[in-house]
Amino acid sequence: MENLLLTVFISSFVMIWAIVKLAKSKNWFVNDADLEGIQKFHTEPVARIGGLSIFVAWSVAMFLSGDQFDLIFKIWLSSLPVFVVGLYEDLSARVSPLIRLLSAFSSIVIVFFWLDIGISSLGFEWVDYVLTDYVIISFLFTLLVVGGAVNSLNIIDGFNGILGGYSILSFLAIAYVAYTLGDEMILQLSLISAASILGFFIFNFPFGKIFMGDGGAYFLGLMLAIIGLMLVDRHAELSNWLVLLIFIYPMYELLYSIYRRKVIHKTDASQPDANHLHSLVYRKLISCDRFKHNKVICNSMTSPVMWLLSLIGIVPAIIWFDNQTILIISAFVFMFIYTIIYKYISSDKFKFNH
């Protein structure tokens, strides 16, 4: 497996290096409009197709996977609709949110009916009865939850390293649980994913030489959901709350953003804004004299703060992976902590030491 992981990493690294070189020397894959928009915090146009290297590295892994080729091919094929549409948006900025959502649903339909991967249990008897006995309800529930999970990773992709770091931590968490349970297949899939991200991460953090883009965010969201749900499906002692807890940071960011826009501010929930928690952290850092208002430093310093926040969900997931009660409690603890932090840091009372 070591040789496979090294090959995956090198494939990702080399492709990112080539993209960065072409973007810098020939101005490929970038446009000036990249600096426009309320959620833009970088100072010069940057290529947004970093996810392509992750996808290609996964493709390399597929052809080198031996006995696992059929399974990995099906997973890879299921990701094509959401990845291709996301990549086209990265290159053209012309794909509507509705089309992107429908592409995610298309991938999930393939996952549910072809790979037979879905959510049919939440650990509550009456809920499990409905999800198990009524396939259409299980399908719609899977469509809603996994669709939200896929889009939530795009929500947190705001600063150098946030998404890449969170994704590596999440896949390593699944790898740890798989290793503990002796599940070599899930272990391999998780480590392949982490290795493919690492090649990108080196160029993305801390200086943002390239961005993940929608294609990469959607692809990783789908892969994380598929591999996590497969792990749960293969081991009766596990609960889908394990997967939810690993996803809790981006998922709650998405849900809280909808609540904040729709209920608190009475605005369109689908419209982007600069009031995500990572944006607030960045603004507090940039206002601090200690960092001399350096945008590059503050951009990169935002990510470790968000990684630490994500670990509030990930660490309990790997410690108590087979204890559903603690997993559920941990999910609510995370939501409580996030809400308190958001309210505190958004107030004028909070300031980093000057």
Image (tube, helix red, strand yellow):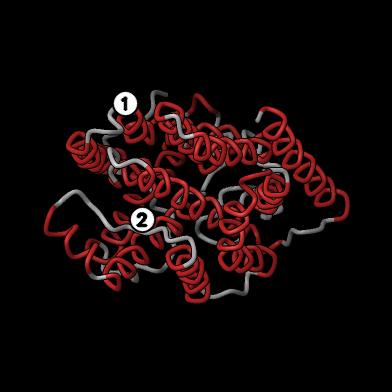
Label at residue 254:
2
Label at residue 319:
1
Decide: is 336 above or below 270. above
Name the residue nearer the viewer: 236 or 148.
236
The amino acid type, in three-letter code, at marker 1 is: Ile
Q: Position of residue 331 (x, y in %)?
A: 24, 41
Name the residue nearer the viewer: 148 or 178.
178
Label 2 packing within 10 angstroms: few (<14), some (14-19), many (20+): many
Q: Position of residue 219 (x, y in %)?
A: 56, 55
* Label 1 SS: helix
Which quadrant would the C terminus be assigned to in this image?
top left
Residue at image location 26% in from the left, 38% down from the top: 334
| Tag in front: 2 or 1 | 1
Extreme residue in the left direction: 126
* Label 2 SS: helix
Which quadrant would the N terminus be assigned to in this image?
top right
The amino acid type, in three-letter code, at marker 2 is: Leu
Q: Report the number of discs.
A: 2
Q: Position of residue 86 (x, y in %)?
A: 59, 64
Residue at image location 47% in from the left, 76% down from the top: 98
Closer to the chain start, of discs 2 and 1, is 2
